[in-house]
Image (cartoon, helix red, strand yellow):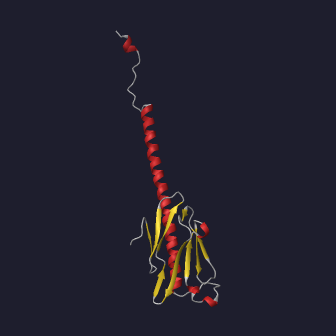
Amino acid sequence: RRTHADMTPKLQNLSGFTFLEVLVNVFILALVSTILLLGAAAARRNAIVRSAAQQIAGFLRETGGLALNGVKAANCDPANSVDCSRYVVIVGPAGRKSEYVRRAVGGGTEVRGVLPAGAVFPVTEQEVRFAYTPPTLTATATSVALEHTTGAPQWLVCVTSLGSIAVHARSCPP
């Protein structure tokens, strides 16, 4: 004879996830995604500033080459012929943190440039001078700092007194 327990349908052993398990997994995925996105944003800022530092280094190398080869600035006064091939690069002229300019000491046409969006010079009105007096190219020994508009990271363009130019992350070698 059948009992009442035999007549009621038995619940099958269902496998699945509880609501709490799904909630924990969603939280973990959201946390990992946030960490990855923050890391990607920091890497992008670093790449922008490093690219800007390389851009400035190239501009400074070009300026040193002009001085070394005695190239006179366009529209320079012939009375200042010696100073027409001596150059000064000013980073952050007139407080504009994302611009730079090259001009001959003797005057003439200026060449201006702009940093990529997001990169700035934390120090403005900084000068780097290049002059060639055979047999030596001389330059202002300095470091030009560049950083992201958020303040980090920072890259340096290092210039030696002999006109050597290199890009470094944190500090210039002695």
Which residue is found at the position 54% from the left and 83% from the top?
66
Q: Does 132 sit left or right of 11 as displayed?
A: right
In this rendering, the answer to whether 154 lies above or below 11 is below
In this rendering, the answer to whether 159 lies above or below 35 is below
Camera-side residue of 125 and 135: 125
Location of residue 123 in the rendering, given as x and y in whole percent from the top left corner? 53, 66
Which residue is found at the position 48% from the left and 65% from the top?
50
Location of residue 43 in the rendering, given as x and y in whole percent from the top left corner? 47, 58
Please, which residue is most extreme toward the left here?
1
Which residue is found at the position 59% from the left and 79% from the top?
103
In this rendering, the answer to whether 72 lies above or below 61 is below
Camera-side residue of 2 and 74: 74
Location of residue 6 in the rendering, given as x and y in whole percent from the top left corner? 37, 14
Please, which residue is most extreme toward the top here?
1
In this rendering, the answer to whether 124 lies above or below 40 is below
Which residue is found at the position 60% from the left and 74% from the top?
112
Quarter of the image that includes the C terminus: bottom left
Count of numbered badges drawn on the protein: 0
Quarter of the image that includes the N terminus: top left
Location of residue 124 in the rendering, given as x and y in whole percent from the top left corner? 56, 67
Q: Residue 14 is drawn in which quadrant?
A: top left
